[in-house]
Image (spheres, helix red, strand yellow):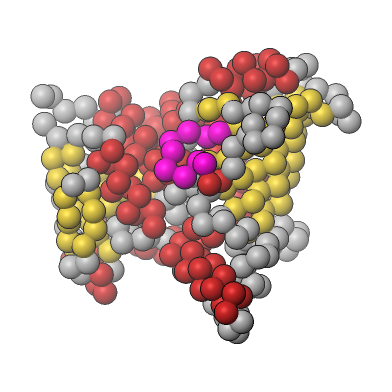
Amino acid sequence: MGYKVAVVGATGMVGREMLNILAEREFPASEVVPLASRRSIGKEVSYGARTLKTLALENFDFKGTDIALFSAGGSVSAEWAPKAAAAGAVVIDNSSHFRMHADVPLVVPEVNAAALAGYTKRGIIANPNCSTAQLVVALKPLHDVAKIRRVVVATYQSVSGAGNQGADELFHQTRAVFVSDPIEKKKFTKQIAFNLIPHIDSFMEDGYTKEEWKMMAETKKMLDPSIKLTATCVRVPVFVGHSEAVNIEFERPISADEARDILREAPGCMVIDKREDGGYITPVECVGEFATYISRIREDTTVENGLNLWVVSDNLRKGAALNAVQIAEILITRHLSKAA
């Protein structure tokens, strides 16, 4: 007996990836319904070997739907996620709207799967920010052993984190550079082709951007409120794959060799760390993969109990779609199991 699954925002980058991953992982769905705005009615999307036609979210009745995967932006989630939950669906939301609500669990399965039990309060589970998701997968097993005191992270985030418009802008600007056409800026505040932009999301009063604040707040909520974290988030001209340079200070001693061994055994982590040319992972190599890759593990001799890591992951997968499907898998195993 399968589950009826709705995918809201099915025509977007993450929505399409959700459909791909549901099929790849053979999620036990009896029916999958792709939903989007009225202008996308009838648009075809792939679900494994099948082609599905998109329906309008505005006209959809969520009654009888078991799980609703949302990836259509904060305003859509704010309006429709509570309606879907009220109709009996468990909502797994990829937007930032519910993440910091005390009565909504914020979950990365490898980090805090037990928090899923709290979904019954509102029928909504939040997916973390893409850059936070891969970070906490790498931090969790190290924190369990040596307890993290402080993290300094610089992110190098691909344009797909800004959706279809971000990817289109990089493509068109790159072509414009080669043919000497004018550079048009629509999605990003400055040219992204052959450039990088130290600005993701809106600026806050303290000088941080909202993307940087999300990493601080979400890490505390999921991993440990005592961890101090500061971030600088940068958009780079890469289509898919977020990278992070991570500096960690621990309360207890931990060597690079110990960290390497711990991470090799940790769920969701893949260590590729050869101290030679090319002995590390780059964004190009992580595309389409499920793992969070960790390279360049080394001791920071400028602080007591310090380590440096290089963390790379497919932001459309672990940063969004894969994490949502993993949540759904645990949900049906522990909380929504149907009799065969």
Q: Is residue 288 magenta?
A: yes
Q: Residue at x 68, y 62 (%)?
A: 196
The reply, left or right, for residue 147 in relation to residue 90 is right
Q: Nearer the viewer, residue 201 or 239?
A: 239
Left or right, residue 190 beside residue 325: right
Q: Residue at x 60, y 60 (%)?
A: 237
The foreground one among 98 and 184 is 184
| Residue at the farthest right position | 302
* Residue 22 sits above or below residue 262 on the image: below
x and y, in percent, of residue 29 in the image: 18, 39
Res 72 → quadrant: bottom left
Residue 82 percent location from the top left of the image: 32, 54
Residue 90 as seen in the image, left or right of residue 178: left
Q: How many marks?
A: 0
Instruction: Please indicate, yes or no, whether residue 280 appears anywhere in the rendered image.
Output: yes
Give coordinates of residue 239: x percent, y percent. Answer: 51, 57
Q: Nearer the viewer, residue 213 or 26?
A: 26
Asked if 273 appears above or below 145 in the picture, the reply is below
Residue 107, percent from left and from top:
46, 36
| Magenta extent | 285-293
Quadrant of image for the C terminus: top left
Q: Is residue 326 magenta?
A: no
